[in-house]
């Protein structure tokens, strides 16, 4: 498996996301086995998701969020590109 290079600053963000996913699972009193089975992933993959591993497929993250009823948060990853729109508007002037 190829190692994914992520700068430390961004690795911390992924780790925080994983921690938030784990807390959401625990708040719902779901075991890792339950979430992994419902998400259609291996328990070891869920462990990596909860650690914020950058090598895990984005689909696995989505399926876990879906099981936790947090799938709408996934849309925030590609929210409206406000900065890009400003750049585009400047070009149009």
Image (tube, helix red, strand yellow):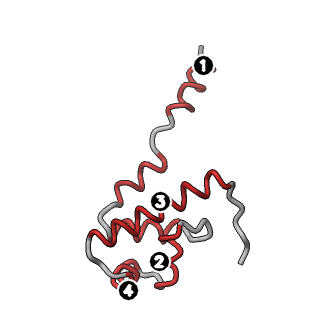
Q: Quick one: 53 or 12, which is closer to the camera?
A: 12
- Compare marks 3 and 1 and give the one earlier in the sequence: 3
Distance in Å between CA atoms under marks 3 and 4? 20 Å
Mark 3 and 1 residues: CB-CB less than 8 Å, in contact?
Answer: no
Percent across and percent down for residue 43 are: 46, 84
Percent across and percent down for residue 66 are: 35, 67
Indicate whether 40 appears above or below 8. below
Q: Quadrant of residue 88?
A: top right
Residue at 40% across, 65% down: 21
Q: Quadrant of residue 36?
A: bottom left
Helix, strand or loop under label 2: helix
- Compare marks 3 and 2 and give the one earlier in the sequence: 3
Q: How many marks?
A: 4
Q: Nearer the viewer, mark 4 or mark 1?
A: 4
Give the quarter of the figure containing the C terminus.
top right
Helix, strand or loop under label 3: helix
Distance in Å between CA atoms under marks 4 and 1? 51 Å
Residue, disc 4: 33
Residue, disc 2: 46
- Compare marks 2 and 1 and give the one earlier in the sequence: 2
Distance in Å between CA atoms under marks 3 and 2? 13 Å
Mark 2 and 1 residues: CB-CB less than 8 Å, in contact?
Answer: no
- Compare marks 2 and 4 and give the one earlier in the sequence: 4
Residue at 63% across, 20% down: 91
| Furthest-left residue in this view | 28
Distance in Å between CA atoms under marks 2 and 1? 44 Å
Can you tell which mark lies on residue 90? 1
Residue, disc 3: 17
């Amino acid at each position: 498996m190829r190692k994914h290079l992520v700068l430390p600053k961004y690795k911390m963000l992924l780790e925080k996301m994983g921690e938030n996913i784990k807390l959401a699972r625990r708040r719902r009193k779901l075991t890792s086995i339950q979430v992994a089975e419902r998400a259609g992933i291996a328990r070891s993959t869920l462990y990596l998701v909860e650690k914020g591993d950058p090598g895990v497929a984005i689909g696995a993250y989505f399926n876990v969020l879906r099981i936790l009823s947090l799938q709408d948060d996934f849309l925030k990853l590609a929210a409206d590109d406000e900065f890009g729109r400003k750049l585009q508007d400047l070009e149009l002037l």
